[in-house]
Image (spheres, helix red, strand yellow):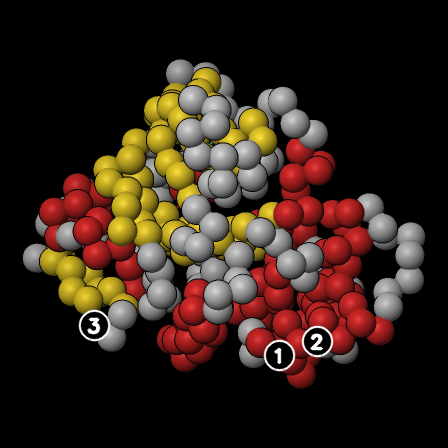
Amino acid sequence: MAGIDDDAVLRLDGVSVRRGDKLLLDSIDWTVEEDERWAVLGANGAGKTTLLQIAAASLHPTSGQAHVFGERLGSVDVFELRPRIGFASAALADRIPGGERVVDVVVSAGYAVIGRWREAYGELDIARATGLLHRFGVGDFGERRYGTLSQGEKARVQIARALMTDPELLLLDEPAAGMDLGGREDLLRRLTALAADADAPASVLVTHHVEELPAGITNVLLLRDGRVVAAGAARDVLTAEALSETFGLALEVERRGGRWYARAR
Ligand SMILES: Nc1ncnc2c1ncn2[C@@H]1O[C@H](COP(=O)(O)OP(=O)(O)OP(=O)(O)O)[C@@H](O)[C@H]1O
């Protein structure tokens, strides 16, 4: 199988993850290419976070093979891969000490992952971090203490932090969770702009809600009980039938202005 698609950012072949009797992921085949912006959709407990942990090289499959940047997990030093991956999630957001200055939260991403934490930050690093904070609508908060930010503001800081190292793969676990409607729509506008940026990394965004997909998502993977229901181009995959199967209820789905909307039938 090696060599079939060595340019892929991520390639999973028959990946399963088992914990005790439970199969968290069941024989997943999935390829993410450099220019693709993926969304992974599924109900609570479907296995989305587990799948993202494999993509982040922080979990190894129980069986099957996972390649990240062409390197097989299990045969490569993951500490070499991780600096090339930007990861933002609520769980990570909660681990950051509340007393940290927001700009330091962002700028330290580079030092944390590449082990340069002893070095002083340069002006260029601060400028880049500040630029990223502005890009995600929290540019005025650089001097604030991280713990004083709202959940939605922290999520934006996390995305800026994930992009700080100029990663080749960006993983976003429910970036709009806990945001009010205005905050969500503003964030989605910014993620849409990121998706349209030819220099932006390949990305995988995990969510429960089709309404939280930014316009510009190119591909979708639907997950139910650890299995792929469908995966491929967004407009082929986001059908009423496939979404209904994914969430276990009859849904209708609609696309408007590049965004997606679902409701019970
Ligand atoms: N160590 C473990 N042992 C047993 N089951 C586990 C373990 N870790 C996770 N699970 C279960 O695996 C399933 C998948 O979990 P995962 O967090 O990947 O789902 P998810 O799709 O991200 O869910 P959510 O949307 O609720 O965050 C869940 O049912 C969870 O309870």
- Name the kind of residue labelled 3 in the image: Arg
Considering depth in this image, is 30 or 189 the residue closer to the camera? Answer: 30
Residue with the most extreme front position: 3
* Cα distance in 3D space between marks 1 and 3: 28 Å
Residue in view at x 63 percent, y 22 percent: 75
Question: Which residue position holds label 2?
Answer: 130
State the SS at label 3: strand
Badge 2: residue crowd in 10 Å (few <14, some 14–19, many ≥20): many
Residue in view at x 44 percent, y 55 percent: 35
* Cα distance in 3D space between marks 2 and 1: 6 Å
Quick one: label 1 or label 3, which is nearer the N terminus?
Answer: 1
Question: Which residue position holds label 3?
Answer: 256
- Name the kind of residue labelled 1 in the image: His
State the SS at label 1: helix
Q: Which image quarter holds the C terminus?
A: bottom left
- In this rendering, is residue 140 above or below 197? below
x, y percent for residue 34: 47, 50
